[in-house]
Image (tube, rainbow, N blue to C red):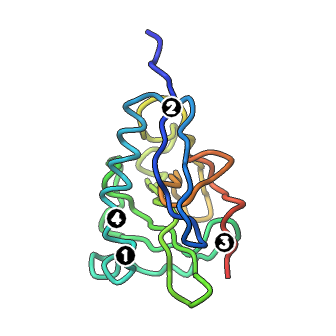
Amino acid sequence: MEEDQTTFSVNSGNVSGNDVQNEYTGLDKKTVWELQQARAASSKYRNIKNAMNDGYIDINVVLPNMGYHYLNPGLLDNTFDPTKPEILVYNKRADGSMELVAVEYAVPIPLSPELAPAGFSGSADVWTRNTAFDLWLLHAWVWHFNPAGVFTPMNMNVVVN
Protein backbone atom coordinates (compact mmCIF):
# COMPACT_ATOMS: atom_id res chain seq x y z
CA MET A 1 0.00 0.00 0.00
CA GLU A 2 1.40 3.38 -0.97
CA GLU A 3 1.55 6.08 1.70
CA ASP A 4 -0.34 9.32 1.13
CA GLN A 5 2.47 11.87 0.87
CA THR A 6 2.03 15.59 0.58
CA THR A 7 3.50 18.82 1.86
CA PHE A 8 2.40 20.28 5.17
CA SER A 9 3.52 23.45 6.90
CA VAL A 10 3.65 24.25 10.59
CA ASN A 11 4.68 27.61 12.05
CA SER A 12 7.85 27.35 14.05
CA GLY A 13 9.82 29.93 16.01
CA ASN A 14 13.49 30.28 15.29
CA VAL A 15 16.32 31.47 17.48
CA SER A 16 15.91 35.11 16.50
CA GLY A 17 12.23 35.00 17.45
CA ASN A 18 10.91 35.30 13.89
CA ASP A 19 8.33 32.85 12.60
CA VAL A 20 9.42 30.55 9.79
CA GLN A 21 7.58 27.91 7.85
CA ASN A 22 8.77 24.42 8.65
CA GLU A 23 7.77 22.31 5.66
CA TYR A 24 7.24 18.61 6.20
CA THR A 25 7.67 17.74 2.52
CA GLY A 26 7.03 14.13 1.64
CA LEU A 27 5.82 13.07 5.09
CA ASP A 28 2.58 11.17 5.32
CA LYS A 29 -0.41 12.76 7.04
CA LYS A 30 -0.14 10.60 10.15
CA THR A 31 3.52 11.55 10.68
CA VAL A 32 2.66 15.24 10.35
CA TRP A 33 -0.22 14.81 12.80
CA GLU A 34 2.16 13.13 15.28
CA LEU A 35 4.67 15.98 14.87
CA GLN A 36 1.89 18.47 15.54
CA GLN A 37 0.97 16.49 18.67
CA ALA A 38 4.62 16.57 19.80
CA ARG A 39 4.69 20.33 19.33
CA ALA A 40 1.41 20.86 21.17
CA ALA A 41 2.43 18.62 24.08
CA SER A 42 5.81 20.33 24.46
CA SER A 43 4.41 23.86 24.20
CA LYS A 44 4.38 24.32 27.98
CA TYR A 45 8.12 23.58 28.03
CA ARG A 46 8.91 26.72 26.07
CA ASN A 47 9.26 28.00 29.63
CA ILE A 48 12.19 25.93 30.91
CA LYS A 49 10.92 26.25 34.50
CA ASN A 50 7.91 24.13 33.54
CA ALA A 51 10.25 21.47 32.19
CA MET A 52 12.27 21.38 35.40
CA ASN A 53 9.08 21.27 37.49
CA ASP A 54 7.99 18.22 35.46
CA GLY A 55 11.24 16.31 36.08
CA TYR A 56 13.52 17.37 33.22
CA ILE A 57 17.10 17.84 34.41
CA ASP A 58 20.11 19.47 32.79
CA ILE A 59 22.36 16.56 31.82
CA ASN A 60 25.22 18.91 30.94
CA VAL A 61 25.23 17.89 27.28
CA VAL A 62 25.71 20.96 25.10
CA LEU A 63 26.40 20.19 21.45
CA PRO A 64 27.06 22.50 18.51
CA ASN A 65 24.16 22.57 16.04
CA MET A 66 21.91 20.94 18.65
CA GLY A 67 21.84 22.80 21.94
CA TYR A 68 21.39 22.17 25.65
CA HIS A 69 19.82 18.82 26.56
CA TYR A 70 17.37 18.25 29.44
CA LEU A 71 16.37 14.65 30.23
CA ASN A 72 13.38 13.35 32.14
CA PRO A 73 14.72 10.04 33.54
CA GLY A 74 11.21 8.99 34.56
CA LEU A 75 10.24 8.74 30.89
CA LEU A 76 13.10 6.41 29.86
CA ASP A 77 11.56 3.12 28.77
CA ASN A 78 10.98 1.24 25.53
CA THR A 79 7.71 3.00 24.70
CA PHE A 80 7.50 5.70 22.03
CA ASP A 81 4.91 8.39 22.65
CA PRO A 82 5.23 11.53 20.50
CA THR A 83 3.62 13.57 23.29
CA LYS A 84 6.19 12.47 25.89
CA PRO A 85 9.72 13.23 24.70
CA GLU A 86 12.40 11.97 27.04
CA ILE A 87 14.67 14.90 26.17
CA LEU A 88 14.03 18.58 25.48
CA VAL A 89 16.62 20.54 23.52
CA TYR A 90 17.11 24.26 24.16
CA ASN A 91 19.32 27.00 22.81
CA LYS A 92 20.47 30.03 24.74
CA ARG A 93 19.29 33.38 23.42
CA ALA A 94 21.51 36.47 23.43
CA ASP A 95 19.77 37.66 26.62
CA GLY A 96 20.62 34.37 28.39
CA SER A 97 17.09 32.95 28.36
CA MET A 98 16.53 29.47 26.97
CA GLU A 99 14.47 28.72 23.86
CA LEU A 100 12.98 25.29 23.17
CA VAL A 101 14.18 24.22 19.71
CA ALA A 102 13.53 20.47 19.52
CA VAL A 103 12.19 17.42 21.27
CA GLU A 104 14.18 14.22 21.40
CA TYR A 105 13.15 10.65 22.04
CA ALA A 106 15.40 8.17 23.83
CA VAL A 107 15.21 4.42 24.39
CA PRO A 108 17.92 2.54 26.31
CA ILE A 109 19.79 0.25 23.90
CA PRO A 110 19.47 -2.77 26.25
CA LEU A 111 15.66 -2.50 25.87
CA SER A 112 15.98 -2.72 22.08
CA PRO A 113 19.45 -4.18 21.47
CA GLU A 114 19.14 -5.29 17.84
CA LEU A 115 16.73 -2.92 16.12
CA ALA A 116 15.91 0.76 16.35
CA PRO A 117 12.70 1.31 18.30
CA ALA A 118 9.40 2.07 16.64
CA GLY A 119 8.88 5.80 16.28
CA PHE A 120 6.81 8.15 14.19
CA SER A 121 4.56 6.68 11.52
CA GLY A 122 6.09 6.25 8.10
CA SER A 123 9.77 5.73 7.42
CA ALA A 124 11.19 9.26 7.60
CA ASP A 125 12.45 9.16 11.18
CA VAL A 126 15.94 7.78 11.70
CA TRP A 127 17.08 6.71 15.15
CA THR A 128 20.75 7.12 16.06
CA ARG A 129 22.46 4.43 18.13
CA ASN A 130 24.52 6.41 20.66
CA THR A 131 26.80 3.96 22.46
CA ALA A 132 28.37 6.71 24.60
CA PHE A 133 25.01 7.20 26.34
CA ASP A 134 23.73 3.66 25.67
CA LEU A 135 20.62 5.14 24.05
CA TRP A 136 18.76 5.11 20.78
CA LEU A 137 18.05 8.79 19.99
CA LEU A 138 15.62 10.54 17.65
CA HIS A 139 15.40 14.32 17.21
CA ALA A 140 12.28 16.15 16.04
CA TRP A 141 12.84 19.83 15.27
CA VAL A 142 9.26 20.93 15.94
CA TRP A 143 10.22 24.35 17.37
CA HIS A 144 13.06 25.47 15.10
CA PHE A 145 13.26 25.03 11.34
CA ASN A 146 15.91 22.54 10.24
CA PRO A 147 16.75 22.86 6.53
CA ALA A 148 18.22 19.34 6.58
CA GLY A 149 14.90 17.85 7.73
CA VAL A 150 12.77 17.63 10.83
CA PHE A 151 14.38 14.33 11.97
CA THR A 152 18.02 15.20 11.18
CA PRO A 153 20.03 15.25 14.44
CA MET A 154 22.11 18.35 13.63
CA ASN A 155 20.61 21.72 12.76
CA MET A 156 22.96 24.23 11.13
CA ASN A 157 20.54 27.02 12.11
CA VAL A 158 21.21 26.41 15.82
CA VAL A 159 24.33 28.21 16.96
CA VAL A 160 25.10 27.36 20.57
CA ASN A 161 25.99 30.43 22.63
Residue at figure coordinates x 30%, y 77% from the top left = 55
Crowd band around label 3 with a 10 angstrom C-alpha radius: few (<14), some (14–19), many (20+): some
The picture places residue 60, in percent across and down from the top left corner, at 55, 81
Of mark 1 and mark 2, the one earlier in the sequence is 2
Name the residue at 30% across, 68% down: 74
User: In the image, which disc is placed on residue 43?
Assistant: 4
Alpha-carbon span between mark 3 and mark 1: 18 Å
Q: 156 or 128, which lies in front?
A: 156
Q: CA distance from mark 1 to mark 2?
A: 29 Å
* Image marks 1 and 2: residues in contact by CB distance under 8 Å: no
Q: Is residue 22 above or below residue 124?
A: below
Q: Is residue 146 left or right of residue 110?
A: right
The residue that mark 3 highlights is 63
Tell whether label 3 touches label 4 (CB within 8 Å). no
The structure residue drawn at horizontal position 49% and vertical position 52%, both measured from the top left corner, is: 109
The amino acid at mark 3 is Leu
Given residues 71 and 129, the one toward you in this image is 71
Of the two numbered discs 4 and 3 in the rendering, the one whose residue sits closer to the viewer: 4
Residue corresponding to mark 2:
27
Amino acid tagged 2: Leu
Residue depth check, mark 1 versus mark 2: number of the one nearer the observer: 2
- The location of residue 18, given as percent across then percent down, is 56, 66
Q: In the picture shown, does residue 100 fall above or below 130?
A: below
The residue under label 1 is 56
Answer left or right for 55 relative to 31.
left
Q: Position of residue 147 (x, y in %)?
A: 67, 49
Q: Residues within 10 Å of mark 4 (few under 14, many from 20)?
A: few
Q: Are marks 4 and 2 in contact (CB under 8 Å)?
A: no
Q: CA distance from mark 4 to mark 2?
A: 22 Å
